[in-house]
Amino acid sequence: MLHFIEHAVFTLVLAVLISIYYKKGPQQFFRVIVLALKELPGVKTIIDLILKNEVSSFVKTTSLAQDVVKSKPRVLIPEKGFTAEDMREQMKNLQKRNANPERDGNVFAYQYTLYDDNYKLQQEAFDLFCEKTGHSVEHDELVKEFFHGFMHENALNPIIFPALRLMETEVVSMTSAMLNGNSEVVGFLTSGGTESNLMAVKTFRDMALATRPNIRKPNIIAPITVHPTIDKAAHYFGLEVIHTPMASDFRADVKAIEQAINSDTVMLVASAPQFCHAVMDPIEEIAALALKKGLPLHVDACFGGFMLPWVEKLGYPVPKFDFRVPGVTSMSADVHKYGFCVKGASVICYKNSDIRKYQIYAYSEWPGGLYGSPSMAGTRPGGNIAAAWAAMKALGQDGYIDKAKTLMDTTVKMIKRIKNVKGLYIMGEPCMTAFAIAARDPNINIQAVADAMETKGWKMERNQLPDSLHCSILPHHIPVADKFLDDLEDATNYCRDNKALAKKGTAGVYGMMANIPDKGIVTDFLVEFFSEVYKCK
């Protein structure tokens, strides 16, 4: 009898595996096999050891090797403090270790202003930018002055620091007006796009739980191209993200979004634009769907919020994406990107104060007094608020339009030239100062092209699924755009003639990752990577 049961179970499992293979394909089939093997005793331990070894080997191939791989004594607070002169010398040495996008114009993300490693402005890029936009040293120094002027103040208590409250509310007001919000639109400043998106998710989760008692496990419907901060927020706050596919034009598939909505859905998310390809999601269609289903729609405009309004005013075709669209409930926009402010400033806006209330945390039973906080952070640095206020007031609409024009001129020139590079193409229809480059020729591996570009000094941003290269066009690219385009054409031709490069370097790593059936292993690799590089021996 026992033998019969074992045989029946084996037959059933085999039938299920065969069904998965034919219905879902070999990728899903092997994923199931890997997941099953991971549950066997000792297998996970072996996988962990292999991952540690692979991460260690990978780190040795990066510029971090000198810091992470070499064994160093543990760092302690010095018994006697260094002098100011010693500290300034150490600062110069530390700054030299970082990438210098303003000096070389070689980075396509992360840093949107023109300060270099010595806190001076790279002269060629700066002079050209000033000539075209009216930008000046005085603006950057002014923003820095405001940051320093309020850097020790704390916006946690608006009664003690009313000036910070005033500046914050004015930044929110200016941002919401820029995004075509009416006088009812309200919000808060945050430390960046991650916190802004986290707050939107927290707000709509709490609002749904308070108004819809039948929700069991709240979920978010978002395109696969949505920024991972939405997934991060869901992970932190106990929600599920149901990802929907891209359409052929790399925009969100509205029909797929509608089909994914269920009784536990608490919000929809769209991007303006999505960062991967700088393509705008069909926000008007998604907003109409949100209204039909009675759901809030959060538009993540962290990347484009401080560029799209001015690009539209310049006459470029920009689909409606902001509070003009009925159904848009909240928006996030980063001042520290194309708002040209120092790092640590973003805005989260809501259609009205009734919605915003769900963002605020309050606790009344602490022996230390009554506690309330409008955002993730408790202590909220005043310098970031003041710098954001100063940047927006000093630039004004004319300053933002001039900057948008200059950067769009460079973007259009680069896109036009890239379209003429044999074997490459621009993905979708980019709507602002960014785009993604992919290979049309199957003999060209775009990740290998990125590796070749990095040997020429460029720091490339890589996309996957499908593979492509992301480029955000920033002020430091203005004087080096032509050199980048020349190098890109050379690198593309070189990789076409040397197909073996696709299996080497970072291109080989991306290729290997793409072929691993269980993406959980890739996730474990990333976790192990961060664990390794942040060691302080």
Image (cartoon, rainbow, N blue to C red):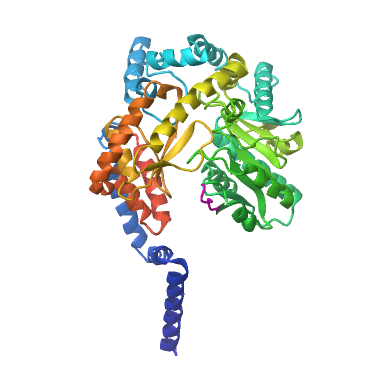
Say left or right for 152 vs 74.
Answer: right
> Nearest the camera: 115 or 213?
115
Where residue 468 sits in the image (x, y, percent)? 40, 43
Q: Quadrant of the N terminus?
A: bottom left
Q: Any magenta on residue 246?
A: yes
Q: Any magenta on residue 61?
A: no
Q: Is residue 410 visible?
A: yes
> Nearest the camera: 251 or 10?
251
Say left or right for 171 vs 504.
Answer: right
Where residue 56 sits in the image (x, y, percent)? 29, 44
Q: Across the whole image, how many numbered discs are drawn on residues? A: 0
What secondary structure do most residues of the magenta stretch adopt?
A: loop
Q: Quadrant of the C terminus?
A: top left
Vertical order, 193 against 284 (above or below): above
Vertical order, 278 against 221 (above or below): above
Where residue 243 sits in the image (x, y, percent)? 55, 52
Looking at the rendering, the stretch of residues picked out in magenta corresponds to 244-249
> Nearest the camera: 32 or 331?
331
The residue located at (63%, 23%) in the rendering is 155
Q: Is residue 390 visible?
A: no
Q: Quadrant of residue 180?
A: top right
Vertical order, 156 against 280 (above or below): above
The residue located at (66%, 23%) in the rendering is 174
